[in-house]
Image (cartoon, rainbow, N blue to C red):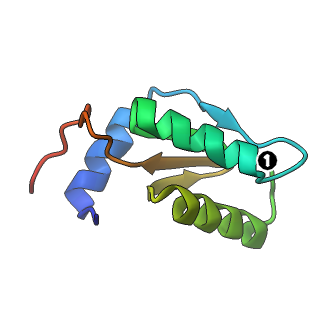
């Protein structure tokens, strides 16, 4: 699934008021963290993940791994916060077509 600019803007607006659901700890990206992100995506569809690193390269690798492992779409990365989206079977969030 790919999103156009209008759909990404819509999701950014929805995510603005959200608090981070998953916080990566000192152990980094583990199987348990991936499972928790997967569970949160099934439940909420749109979530924020807090990534506690200042290194851009490391953060980029973590973001890429999260999106790949959970089949989610990266909506935005702001500072240490990642916003990702994955549609669930219930389709709780109605995304505009255009």
Q: Which residue is mark 1?
A: 52
Would residue 58 be found to the left or right of residue 63 on screen? right
Crowding near pointer 1: few (<14 within 10 Å), some, many (20+)? Answer: some
| Foreground of the two, 53 or 89 | 89
Element assignment for label 1: loop
Residue under the point 28% across and 66% down: 2
Q: Work out which quarter of the rendered image holds the N terminus and state it.
A: bottom left
Would residue 35 be found to the left or right of residue 14 on screen? right
Residue under the point 65% across and 35% down: 22
Residue 20 at what x, y percent from top left?
60, 32
Q: Residue furthest left?
A: 98
User: From this viewpoint, is residue 16 visible?
Assistant: no
Q: Is residue 38 above or below residue 21?
A: below
Q: Work out which quarter of the rendered image holds the C terminus and state it.
A: bottom left
Residue 42 at what x, y percent from top left?
43, 37
Would residue 38 be found to the left or right of residue 2 on screen? right
Residue under the point 45% across and 26% down: 17
Q: Is residue 11 above or below residue 44?
A: below
| Foreground of the two, 83 or 70 | 70
Residue 41 at what x, y percent from top left?
47, 39
Q: Is residue 27 above or below residue 90?
A: below
User: From this viewpoint, is residue 43 visible?
Assistant: yes
């Amino acid at each position: 699934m790919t999103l156009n600019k209008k759909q990404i803007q819509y999701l950014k607006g929805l995510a603005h008021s959200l608090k981070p659901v998953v916080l990566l700890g000192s152990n980094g990206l583990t199987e348990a963290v991936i499972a928790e992100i997967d569970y949160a995506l099934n439940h909420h569809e749109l979530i924020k993940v807090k990534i506690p690193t200042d290194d851009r390269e490391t953060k980029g690798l973590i973001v890429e791994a999260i999106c790949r492992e959970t089949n989610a779409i990266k909506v935005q990365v702001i500072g240490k916060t990642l916003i990702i989206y994955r549609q669930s079977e219930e389709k709780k969030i109605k995304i505009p077509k255009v």
